[in-house]
Image (cartoon, rainbow, N blue to C red):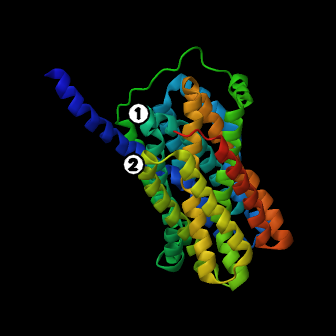
Amino acid sequence: MKSNTYSTVEPKMQYAKLVPVMLCFFAMGFVDLVGIASNYVQADLNLSNAEANIFPSLVFFWFLIFSVPTGMLMNRIGRKKTVLLSLLVTFFSLLLPIFGDGYALMLVSFSLLGIGNALMQTSLNPLLSNIVSSDKLASNLTFGQFVKAIASFLAPYIAMWGATQAMPSMGLGWRVLFPIYMVIALVAILLLNATSIVEEKEEGKPSTYTQCLALLGKPFVLLSFIGIMCHVGIDVGTNTTAPKILIERLGMTLAEAGFATSLYFIFRTVGCLAGTFILQKAEAKIFFGISVACMLAAMVGLFCFQSLISIYICIALIGFGNSNIFPIIFSQALLAMPNKKNEVSGLMIMGLFGGTVFPLAMGVASDAVGQNGAVAVMTIGVVYLLLYMFKIKKTC
């Protein structure tokens, strides 16, 4: 009788543990506010494209510095405590902009946001593997990305509401986004701290920094690392460039063009939700190929189309196509080296450094030849993902 009772109760307990973890995924989405925020800061401080793109680049620069050390930190203090630390850093990053939007203050805020997100993305994804079985990891990672995308597409709406409604009289304006997300981060800290999660211990001695980086010598791990760089480069690139395309080609205001960022994240959210179910049934390789095909068609369209509806369709295709790239690559990398999940997770999240490389290159290209230059940089990333598809195993 006891064993039967345990087998029926345990799945319910596991689902209950998913709630605070998924709220952490929502908090993970706070990093995507940097796209719309950088556009508002650019307008407030009259910055060039290259200067404004320093903000998203700075956020993702910290993934290069902190991801691998975070993988090592998890070996010492555990994944849950590392996630809690990341939420605490995120909380303080969201606190600072309440006091103003000066250039130096926003640089510090976005730096802390990037550090917190580097800690969170490195530790939260493998923490999820302690709750769900390996055959459900890809679909649950996709569901986590769906929850993350909700926070992402809400950010432009909250900023626009703050900029156009009652908030200007309170001195916050679009920055009302920060205290709202700060409160949610605090709730995530409290809920996760109250949740008991049993973590698996990795075999052997914890890897050193050099040993972690040496895993890039494994061909598939290196290819996956570059794939993550391209995914996040396209993500951050579209996030920041979509409104600029509309402003450049159609003469729209920033408030009007800001919907393009929300549209991208709406379709990313839809894609993540669809992928949660599709990846339980379909081959990861086939679904990955369809996703990349959507993005490739969209890039061609952005070079050619000038009408509002056509550009919106292209942005939607990028959002849908890019929605499931990360969980497929990430799960493939973890399953390729199951005894080194913490280290591999750190390396994959270090690949989010692509969010620094791509915006910088796109800023320079767009200043030189217009937003088509930024689209060309993103297209390079899409072509790489198309080539990566042939390395994905038939089953995930």
Please tell me which of labels 2 and 1 falls first in the chain. Answer: 1
Query: Which SS class for mark 2?
Result: helix
Camera sees residue 242: yes
At 48% from the left and 65% from the top, the residue drawn is: 154
- Residue at mark 2 to residue at mark 1: CA–CA distance: 27 Å
Q: Residue at x 41, y 48 (%)?
A: 23
- Name the spot of residue 276 as percent of width and height, x first: 43, 51
Circle on res. 153: none
Residue that extends furthest to the top in the rendered view of this protein: 204
For the residue marked with disc 2, what is the amino acid? Val
Considering the numbered disc 1 on the image, is that residue within a helix, a strand or a loop?
Answer: loop
Where is residue 177 shown, x and y percent of the image?
51, 64
251 or 36, nearer to the observer: 251
Q: Which one is closest to the eye, mark 2 or mark 1?
A: 1
Q: Amino acid at mark 1?
A: Ser
The quadrant holding residue 37 is bottom right
Where 85 falls versus 287 (above or below)? above
Which circle marks residue 133 in the picture?
1
Identify the residue under disc 2: 187
Q: Quadrant of residue 304?
A: bottom right
39 or 182: nearer the viewer: 39
Q: For mark 1, does the 10 Å Cα neighbourhood hold few (<14), some (14 to 19), or many (20 or more) residues?
A: few
Q: Position of residue 285 (x, y in %)?
A: 57, 46
- Would residue 242 be found to the left or right of residue 196 on screen? right
x then y, percent, for residue 12: 26, 38
Q: Is residue 245 left or right of residue 156?
A: right
Q: Residue at x 60, y 35 (%)?
A: 333
Q: Residue at x 17, y 28 (%)?
A: 5
